[in-house]
Image (tube, rainbow, N blue to C red):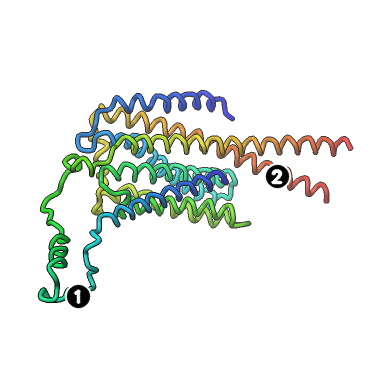
Amino acid sequence: MPAWFTPAAIVCGVMFAGSPVVIAGAPYESTMGLVQKIFYYHMPSAWMFLTASIVCGVASGRFLSTGDGRHDRTAWSAAEMAVLFGLLTLVTGPLWARKAWGTWWVWDARITSSLVGWMIAWAYLILRKYGGPGSEKLAAGLALFGMANVPFIYISVNYWRTIHPATTVVPRLPVSMGVPLWYCVAAFLLLLVLLLKLRVRVAEQQARLDAIYLSLDEQRR
Amino acid sequence: MTTLLRATSVAVLIVAVWGASVTAQIQRVIPPSLPPLHMPIPPPELLDERVLMRLAQAKPEQQEEFLPIDQLPPQEQLPAGPLLVGAYAFVLLVLFGYLVSVARRLSAIQREVDRLDADVKQIGRG
């Protein structure tokens, strides 16, 4: 692993350990009260889910154009990140909505498109695991659809009727709420980078192992 | 991958439990005395007094305006604490579980590489 990995992991651990203290210092939102504090983990999770989907799509596009296995490994790892952070988003959201909206789930444009994006990431992983030879190119094509879904998820609240707040909410947050939010975004972003690096490392080692097995087989023949 | 599949199975299970609880709540809300919508109501002279009273009671009151959550009666308010703690606990547990899963995969591959190295060395000596 690179030299920066361990210090960055320590910083990330400290940031997550300190996040409850930072979040507890944020004021209560006037109408939702305590439950609104789910926001500080829900929104960074959602942003990392979208970021991972974009990384997966870009790496897949580069893999399709260059055929370089490194991009394929990055895309595969990013798809796993998209599933992971998508799961966090889709679970913390209903927990917040149950109290704030009085319902676990609403089939509005943002939630539905997020679910579709998450299922595309799952489909990518399932295709890679069970698709057999050649599945990497099929999965890469799928990842492009997953990436195309990202802007739709983001802007959907501005164009369709929904209970979700519009995208203008975050820039207008007071400093007392903005600081904990951006702190959590930084922690989640660092975590995404570290997990992605670790997962790419697993994929690289696996590729190396496969190459050794292939060369051993050729030597035996 | 296996751990992810397991984690998702657990998530699906949780969603199923939520669904069951929501369904149970809906069933509680529907008054058992209401006749099904498709059933024709006979003329009043054919109904006895008890049936008329039950029909009158079953008629829901019209709500004319939005009621903010904080103005709901206490028995209809949900406590925020368990939802908040549940959300944070879920995030941290899933992240920790995934980290353990990646670390295990990495160490398993490393062990296999070491074993292969030893085999290659043995073949070289032979």
Residue A72 on image: x %, y %: 56, 47
Q: Disc 1 to disc 2, how far (Cα)? A: 75 Å
Residue with the mark numbered 1: B40
| Residue A152 visible from this viewpoint | no
Q: Give the side of residue A208 with respect to residue B25, left or right.
A: right
Give how far across and how far down residue A167 sits, in percent.
27, 43
Secondary structure, mark 1, is: loop
Number of other residues with Cα within 10 Å of mark 1, as a class: few under 14, some 14 to 19, many 20 or more: few
The relative height of residue A73 versus residue A127 in the rendered view (above or below) is above
| Image height of B36 relative to A33, above or below | below
Marks 1/2 in contact by CB < 8 Å: the verdict is: no
The lab-note entry on whether marks 1 and 2 share a chain reads no
Disc 1 sits on a residue from what chain? B
Q: Residue at x 58, y 35 (%)?
A: B103
* 1 or 2: mark nearer the eye: 1
Quadrant into which the N terminus of chain A falls: top right
The amino acid sitting under disc 1 is Pro
- Residue A196 against residue A65 in the figure, above or below: above
Q: Residues within 10 Å of mark 2 (few under 14, many from 20)?
A: few
Q: Where residue A170 is drawn, which disc sits there?
A: none
Residue A21 position by quadrant:
top left
Q: Position of residue A175 (x, y in %)?
A: 25, 27
The residue drawn where x is 55% and y is 55% is A127
- Which residue lies at the image location 42% right of the left edge and 52% below the top edge? B16
Front position in the image: A91 or A217: A91
Marked residue chain, label 2: A
Q: What residue did someone put label 2 on?
A: A211
How many marks overall? 2
Q: Position of residue A12 (x, y in %)?
A: 46, 27
Q: Is residue A16 visible?
A: yes
**Label 2 sits on what residue type?**
Ala
